């Protein structure tokens, strides 16, 4: 007697369908055999499935039960296969109507038959939509999966409900949870700091990476936390990509329509930032910030090897994590924003407080940021101590006004085909450059020791300044501002 249902395994953030096949035969001794590269949590499913079936009023067959998780060469992990295993065993034991097991299911069984939430609900919904099958999930996971349209999602609180759900007509889709609106930090709270505000606006308009240097209390973190408020809302596609990364990390957030903001502590591990972990790799902070902002406060305090590990992911928009001979890819299209003190004491160059660091100590502190990493910051700005008049002065321009200009600039970029941060050399060459702008950039190659990467990054920023100026021609003023923000802060 044979029964089969479908589950999923997450390979990175992508769901891989897994067929859960059960074969029940007569035997002198009751056996429960699991094959298909299961981990320890899956091997322990036998007792959970047995107890859940008995608690739900179903007889657990005293026969030889072989459960195969296919494809056999794909490692499987976690307790999410409990529910599909139980359904397959019930189907193989003729306790379900013929064809009722043609569903996608995911869930951990408790001994009393209740079903607990698991990671991968959104991936299960994707698999169900591609296969044209209903999707059985615990209620919490079902709410996450309801982000997708065109999927018959059936929330089931226990095994008995799951058995009933296999035989009913298509159910209603659960409304996805909406994140609380909360309070959006407004750029109007920032007084003064005109250069830093301008750099923030340019960074938002072109998706550029930004480094702010300044004394403690000068407003670096305050500015960074207000960057998401001037970014455009995420498109449905971008929001879904981000939601998939959060779901793969086991932290579903429902529908995401705002740019995420992540600010990990400098004591975080490489796996926590880039992705990985023991067993099946999970996304790190750089993937949770996908389509948003990854803010590294006191970036000089992060270990150099961790900072260098960010170079390739922010350049390519994805990160590959290899484990046990397999590699998974996580998204990482982020804006990197760094904030750092100019020296260990923080007051190098301050007009009121003298620096207490020796030149040797200050130089060693600056060397924590490698040249290749610094080269990837398109904009570098010094955030200075405010004057008393600025602190007591009027509030700054509101985020809504800045966002209006940012949205208009991005529309111009999308009309050309890509965000300015993503432009390659031939696309930059094809843009309209004034002779004065070209000459200014040529001189800067020698005076500012621009690298080949820096050459293109300055041109990208200049293009963004022109977009904010609603100019088709990238002129000398646009290039001068881009070069000013390229210098050492």
Image: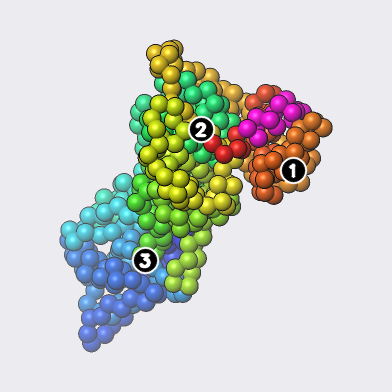
The mark closer to the camera, 3 or 2, is 2
Question: Which disc number belongs to residue 13?
Answer: none
Magenta segment range? 471-484
* Most distant residue in the right direction: 435
Q: Which of 283 and 100 is in front in this view?
A: 283
| Residue linked to disc 1 | 427
At horizontal 25% and vertical 60% (from top left) the residue drawn is 109
Picture coordinates of residue 64 (x, y %)? 28, 80
Relative to 396, is 69 above or below?
A: below
Could you give the CA–CA distance between mark 1 and mark 3, rounded to whole angstroms? 42 Å
In the rendered image, residue 217, in percent from the top left (x then y), is placed at 37, 30
Camera-side mark, 2 or 1:
2
Instruction: Let me know if residue 265 appears in the view.
Output: yes
Disc number at residue 382?
A: 2
Q: In this view, does 400 lie to the left or right of 156?
A: right
- Check if residue 481 falls in the magenta segment: yes
Residue 181 can be seen in this image: no
Pick the quarter of the image with the N terminus.
bottom left
In the rendered structure, the answer to whether residue 63 lies left or right of residue 200 reads: left
Residue drawn 51% across and 60% down? 320
Please name the residue that numbered disc 3 is placed on. 279
In the rendered image, residue 324, in percent from the top left (x then y), is placed at 44, 72
Residue nearest the observer in this picture, 122 or 159 = 122
Report the number of discs: 3
Q: Residues within 10 Å of mark 1 (few under 14, many from 20)?
A: few
> Which of the two marks, 1 or 3, is nearer to us in this view?
1
252 sits to left or right of 399: left
Q: Residue at x 71, y 26 (%)?
A: 477
- Reply above or below: 289 against 39: above
The answer to whether residue 280 is left or right of residue 64 is right
Q: Tell which circle, 2 or 1, labels the residue nearer the N-terminal end.
A: 2
**Sequence-wise, which precedes: disc 1 or disc 3?**
3
């Amino acid at each position: 007697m044979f029964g089969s249902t479908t589950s999923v395994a997450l390979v990175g953030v992508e769901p891989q369908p897994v067929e859960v096949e059960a074969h029940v035969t007569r035997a002198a001794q009751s056996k429960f055999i699991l094959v298909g590269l299961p981990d320890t949590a899956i091997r322990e499913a036998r007792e959970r499935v047995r107890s859940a079936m008995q608690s739900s009023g179903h007889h657990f067959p005293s026969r030889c039960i072989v459960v195969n998780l296919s494809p056999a060469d794909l490692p499987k992990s976690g307790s999410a296969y409990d529910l599909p295993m139980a359904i397959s065993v019930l189907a193989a034991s003729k306790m379900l109507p013929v064809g009722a097991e043609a569903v996608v299911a995911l869930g951990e069984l408790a001994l009393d038959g209740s079903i607990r939430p698991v990671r991968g609900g959104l991936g299960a919904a994707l698999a169900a939509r591609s296969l044209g099958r209903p999707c059985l999930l615990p209620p919490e996971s079902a709410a996450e999966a309801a982000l997708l349209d065109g999927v018959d999602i059936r929330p089931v609180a226990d095994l008995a409900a799951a058995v009933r759900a296999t035989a009913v007509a298509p159910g209603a889709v659960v409304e996805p949870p909406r994140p609380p609106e909360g309070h959006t930090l407004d750029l109007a709270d920032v007084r003064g700091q005109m250069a830093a505000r301008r750099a923030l606006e340019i960074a938002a308009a072109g998706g550029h990476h930004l480094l702010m240097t300044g004394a403690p209390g000068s407003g670096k973190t305050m500015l960074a936390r207000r960057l998401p408020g001037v970014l455009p809302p995420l498109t449905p596609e971008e929001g879904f990509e981000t939601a998939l990364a959060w779901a793969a990390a086991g932290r579903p957030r429902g529908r995401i329509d705002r740019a995420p903001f992540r600010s990990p502590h400098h004591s975080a591990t490489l796996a926590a930032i880039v992705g990985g972990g023991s067993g099946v790799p999970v996304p790190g902070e750089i993937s949770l910030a996908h389509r948003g902002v990854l803010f590294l406060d006191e970036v000089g305090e992060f270990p150099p090897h961790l900072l260098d590990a960010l170079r390739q992911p922010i350049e390519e928009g994805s990160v590959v994590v290899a484990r046990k001979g397999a590699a998974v890819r996580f998204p990482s299209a982020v804006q990197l924003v760094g904030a750092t003190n100019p020296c260990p004491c923080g007051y190098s160059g301050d007009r009121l407080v003298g620096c207490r660091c020796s030149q040797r100590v200050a130089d060693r502190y600056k060397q924590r940021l490698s040249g290749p990493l610094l080269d990837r910051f398109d904009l570098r700005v010094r955030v200075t101590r405010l004057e008393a008049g600025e602190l007591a002065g009027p509030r700054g321009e509101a985020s809504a006004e800045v966002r209006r200009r940012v949205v208009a600039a991005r529309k111009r970029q999308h009309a050309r085909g890509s965000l300015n941060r993503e432009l390659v050399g031939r696309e930059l060459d094809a843009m309209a450059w004034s002779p004065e702008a070209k000459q200014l950039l040529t001189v800067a190659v020698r005076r500012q020791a621009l690298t080949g990467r820096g050459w293109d990054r300055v041109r990208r920023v200049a293009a963004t300044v022109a977009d904010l100026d609603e100019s088709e021609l990238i002129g000398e003023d646009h290039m001068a501002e881009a070069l000013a923000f390229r210098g050492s802060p």
